[in-house]
């Protein structure tokens, strides 16, 4: 139901745009989040978007650098990542949570039920 793309190897300071294609039947009825997991670390919430599109959440480490938005016509949620740093290196996942449940701007991974396969982002000089 969720398919990520857009990862890659970039130098510090570069930008990437990740895409998450969400199945049409659920695209507008779920909260969508972006998460990442670096080697040896727990999965963490990066950014999330409420089903209505009215609310967003960002981790402190990415505020001002990352932006989440969606294109309903393409059933896609994007994560624009600017000024990438080596500490942003991780596998990035998108995930969905039913709109029937509340939306938390903290983007806790444990609240999301449906997950994509992930896309690798590596930031290195």
Image: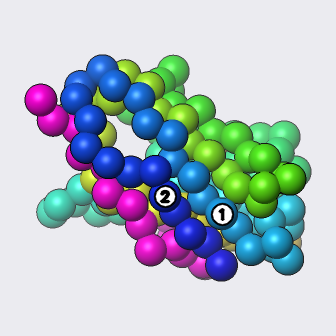
Could you tell which of marks 2 and 1 lies nearer the N-terminus?
2
Question: According to the image, what is the colour scheme of the structure?
Answer: rainbow
Residue for point 62% across, 46% down: 78
Quarter of the image containing the N terminus? bottom right
**CA distance separating discs 2 and 1:** 9 Å
Residue for point 54% across, 74% down: 115
Residue bearing mark 1: 21
Q: Indicate the secondary structure of the residue bearing disc 2.
A: strand
Residue range highlighted in magenta: 109-125
In this rendering, the answer to whether 27 lies above or below 117 is above
Relative to 121, 114 lies left or right: right
Q: Which mark is residue 5?
A: 2
Residue 76 x/y as whole percent: 71, 55
CA neighbours of label 2 inside 10 A, class few (<14), some (14 to 19), many (20+): some
Residue 40 x/y as whole percent: 15, 63
Q: For residue 2, what is the image quadrant?
A: bottom right
Foreground pick, 48 / 81: 81
């Amino acid at each position: 139901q969720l398919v990520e793309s857009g990862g890659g190897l970039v130098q510090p300071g570069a930008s990437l745009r990740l895409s998450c294609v969400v199945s049409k039947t659920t695209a507008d009825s779920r909260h969508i989040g972006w998460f990442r997991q670096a080697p040896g670390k727990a999965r963490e919430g990066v950014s999330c978007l409420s089903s209505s599109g009215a609310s967003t959440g960002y981790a402190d480490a990415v505020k001002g650098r990352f932006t989440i938005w969606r294109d309903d016509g393409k059933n896609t949620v994007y994560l624009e990542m600017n000024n990438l740093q080596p500490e942003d290196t991780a596998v990035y996942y998108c995930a969905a949570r039913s709109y029937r449940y509340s939306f938390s701007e903290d983007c806790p991974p444990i609240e999301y039920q449906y997950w994509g396969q992930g896309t690798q982002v590596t930031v290195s000089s």
